[in-house]
Amino acid sequence: MVEITGLVKVYPDTRALDGIDLTIDSGKIYGLLGPNGSGKSTLLKCIAGLLRPDQGQIKVFGQRPGRVTKAKVAYLPEIDYLYRWMTIGEIINFVAAMYPDWREDKVDELLKNMNLTKEQKINSLSKGMRARLKLVIAMARETELVLLDEPLSGLDPSSRGKIVDMILSEFRSERQSVILSTHEVGETENLYDEVIFLDKGTIRIMDQAEKLRQNHGLSINDLFREVFL
């Protein structure tokens, strides 16, 4: 699905990505793990086509990120982009009009699972409820690649649990891959098929999740703590 070679992204005050080589295969959930500032969000934005690399190459479904690939990728940003003056139904209709792969038949089911209704105003929702809505919007599309940037950050335990459950239940393993960026490893590690530890713009560790557990005799969460804390 994704092939990355020699990826470099530089901001005025930092080298956010420093020579990333990475292949994302179909049918897997990838944990993109690292502390704040490790380059996780920048990497996802490059794959989504929102940032251009300064060096190196990215191919998404065999093409450079752009208009064609954006239509095939569902991207959930860390920022809260929801218009607060809209209702949930209005924001759903707004987003649905942008994507031909929108699954209208799934939206009501996903909203119900997240304890949300179309009549609710965005400005009346808690942070956790808005995070659930953002995930509904990402998972309601018929995409082969889903990019989730810190979907659990700063949320209450109930919302974190609902989000993890939805990722697992809606993942279509026969033809889809998910890249989940987070530093909330304990609650998400059972999702991962593959794990990527990103540190200061470089890949520190990359392997199958189960192989890492066996080789290190640690959970992914404990290994994360050993590497980064």
Image (cartoon, rainbow, N blue to C red):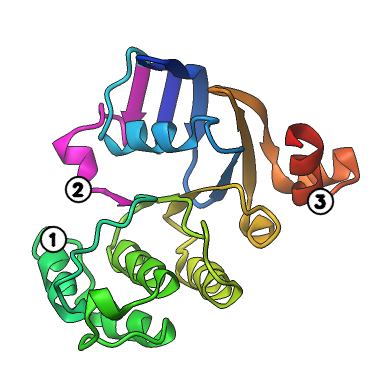
Nearer to us of marks 3 and 2 is 3
Residue topped by disc 2: 71
Q: Residue at x 69, y 36 (%)?
A: 207
Residue type for callout 1: Pro
Q: Secondary structure at mark 3?
A: loop
Q: Evaluate whether residue 202 shows in this view.
A: yes
Q: Secondary structure at mark 1?
A: loop
| Residue 180 coordinates in the image, percent (x, y) | 51, 50
Question: Is residue 196 shown above or below 8?
Answer: below
The answer to which of marks 3 and 2 sits earlier in the sequence is 2
> Considering the image in quadrants, where does the N terminus appear?
top left
Residue topped by disc 1: 100
| Residue 27 coordinates in the image, percent (x, y) | 50, 52
With 17 as the anchor, is 195 left or right in this view?
right
The stretch drawn in magenta includes residue 12: no
Residue topped by disc 3: 219
First to last magenta residue range: 57-76
Do the numbered discs 1 and 3 sit on residues whose CB atoms are within 8 Å?
no
The answer to which of marks 1 and 3 sits earlier in the sequence is 1
Residue type for callout 3: Ser
Q: Residue at x 81, y 51 (%)?
A: 219
The alpha-carbon separation of the residues under discs 3 and 2 comes to 36 Å
Q: Residue at x 40, y 32 (%)?
A: 42
The alpha-carbon separation of the residues under discs 1 and 2 comes to 8 Å
Q: Nearer the viewer, residue 209 or 52?
A: 52
